[in-house]
Amino acid sequence: MTEPHGASLFADLSASRGGFAVDLRFEVPAGGCLAVFGPNGAGKSTLLAALAGLLPLRRGEVRLDDRVLEQAGRLRERPEHRRITLLEQKPRLFPHLTLTQNIAFGPRAQGVTRSDARRAALDWLERIGLAHRADARPHELSGGQQQRVAVARAFAADPRVILLDEPFSALDAESAPAVRRLLSAELARTGTTSVLVTHELSDAFPWAESCLVLDHGRVVDSGSPHDLATKPGHPFAARLAGFSVVPGTWRSGSLQVAGASLGGVPDAPLAEGAQAFGIVAPRDVAVRFGDAGGVRTSIRSVSAHAGALRLETTVGLVAELSLAEALASSAGRMPEPGDPVSVTPSALRVVAAPTR
Amino acid sequence: MTLPRGLYVAALVALAFLVLPVVGLVTRAHWSTLWSDLFAPASLTALWLSLWTAACATIVCLVLGLPLAVVIARSTTRLAGVLRTIVLIPLVLPPMVGGLALLSLLGRVGLLGKPIFQFSGFSLPYTSAAVVVAQAFVALPFLVITVEGTLRTSGIGHEQIASTLGAGRWRVLGTVTIPLIAPGIAAGTALCFARALGEFGATALFAGNAPGVTQTMPLAIYTAFNGVGITQDSAVALSLLLLVSAAVIVGGLRAWREDAVR
């Protein structure tokens, strides 16, 4: 990547739409990427709409480098002047236009001549491997091809910031990698600043330097993708990173779950009787079949992944063990939902339950 | 799920209720003289007047109705509800009342008509232009409601993307919104034209029944059965023409929509 083409994005804002509200502050350096996670209804799409200018701020401001794009109640630059484009999970190509016209739409709207815009669009089609479909209509393409055209259309508009709203979530396993590669290559080539909303922590690793976890419109966890993957501080972030999360009560220096005392090390001092969550990697959860100490529970579901079995229990703890281990501890029988088990987590971190 | 047999019988009765009058009309026609009845000078005059006034009324509806449909579709739910109710009034109003309302507004002593007449000496009622106004008044809801429905279905996602790509509001309207709802506009236009072509009550009261000036096809048919004007055979031929036009428009729209769905 040479000199980043993107601008630094600063936001300190509050906005709401259709019952979803968001209130936060962040800064993304020029050419950087911020990944935003959160459960459904956390306010992620509301945030992107506010940044794009599709939704007025209730409080605060949005700045691009030194340029103020919006100050609540005082100044509001319209979306077409912000140079912030949006790429959603649906490609939303214009169905009445050809692929070339779709990609040329942004340049044309910004005053580029018809012939120059067409030439640029044809270059983009070449780059995304669809030059032979230049005059096709969007409905003639597969979902993955349509999303590649949507990526090209977004970058062809020469944005300073691109907002990515779960751009891979509507794609099947075959077409998603091609779109991922294209987006990754274009972000690196152009140095465009980006904000990525996603449900996959793995999406953040190639691009994002920093991440935010939203819940009910507020930041509940933040850090680098590595921080979130190894030491998440919020139950949602922990589940996102593949940890097993169990709710309990903090008493006498130990997390109490379903009548069992699991120990655990709190991230911060916890008051006696405080509601808390235990966070543990599934491989650090020991399982014994029958009643053998630890938390007495039963198996809710059994799944297999890369030769290992994942057992989800009714208290919420998930254990991961090899097939051989599972067979050895269950007298040679495959574990089934409903089987009584005792689970004992080791290396348990304890975090306070989020307050609403 | 199999429906109760009685329901099919009731549905058949309803269908017969709609179809049998049409059958009656078709059996009454003198097929051997149909063309000469249709193209008799008096009926041809009514036919031509109907066609051009309905075309003008449709253009008026497009010019006035499209902006209104867009505003309703993009309004808050509450405001849209109020606006939609206002638009629907001419649809449920007895056409004669519509004609009286137009006279009260644009007549020589009407709210607007009086100052216009005093200032310019121009009086709208009982002119061909009045026919266009009466037709547009009753046909406008068809266009607005059809286009507004299409706009709501198409949503605002494409428009928002277009604006983030750098397109201003007029550009978004012209290059994204209107093309996206083109099928709805075409359907609304066809329905609007059909309604204008068949308009009777408001035209009779507001524009009168002068052959060659305001006597459209429906008025000519009515007059014929009062024993004056065109012959009753010509009236039946014109009625068949209106019937075929309506069938072609409704059938055409249906086929087109099915094609669009496929």
Image (cartoon, coloured by chain):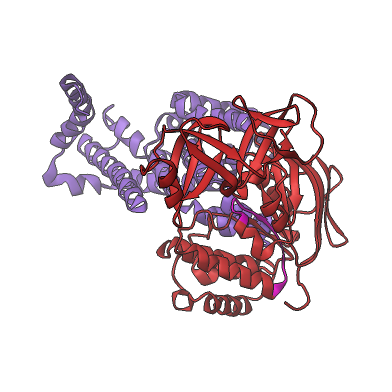
Chain colours: A red, B purple
Task: Using the rendered image of the protein, determine whether residue A25 is visible from the camera's viewpoint.
Answer: yes
Query: Which residues are drawn in magenta?
Result: A190-201
Relative to residue B190, is residue B41 drawn left or right?
A: left
Q: Residue at x 85, y 62 (%)?
A: A65
Q: Residue at x 28, y 43 (%)?
A: B247
Question: Can you say whether B186 is above or below B131 in the image?
Answer: below
Q: Observer-nearest residue: B12 or B61?
A: B12
Residue A173 placed where, x, y %? Answer: 46, 60
Task: Using the rendered image of the protein, determine whether residue B120 is visible from the camera's viewpoint.
Answer: no
Residue A63 placed where, x, y %? Answer: 83, 56
Q: Residue at x 48, y 59 (%)?
A: A95
Q: Residue furthest left?
A: B32
Relative to residue A173, is residue A36 drawn left or right?
A: right
Q: Observer-nearest residue: A348 or A60?
A: A348
Q: Is residue B154 magenta?
A: no
Residue A74 placed where, x, y %? Answer: 87, 45
Task: Give the quadrant of residue B227.
Answer: top left
Question: Can you say whether B92 is above or below B186 in the image?
Answer: above
Q: Residue at x 21, y 44 (%)?
A: B37
Q: Residue furthest top?
A: B6
In the rendered image, which quarter contains the N terminus of chain A? bottom right
Number of on-image labels: 0
Q: Observer-nearest residue: A45 or B146?
A: A45
Residue A139 placed where, x, y %? Answer: 42, 61
Q: Observer-nearest residue: B254 or B33?
A: B254
Question: Can you say whether B86 is above or below A305 in the image?
Answer: above
In the rendered image, which quarter contains the C terminus of chain A? top right
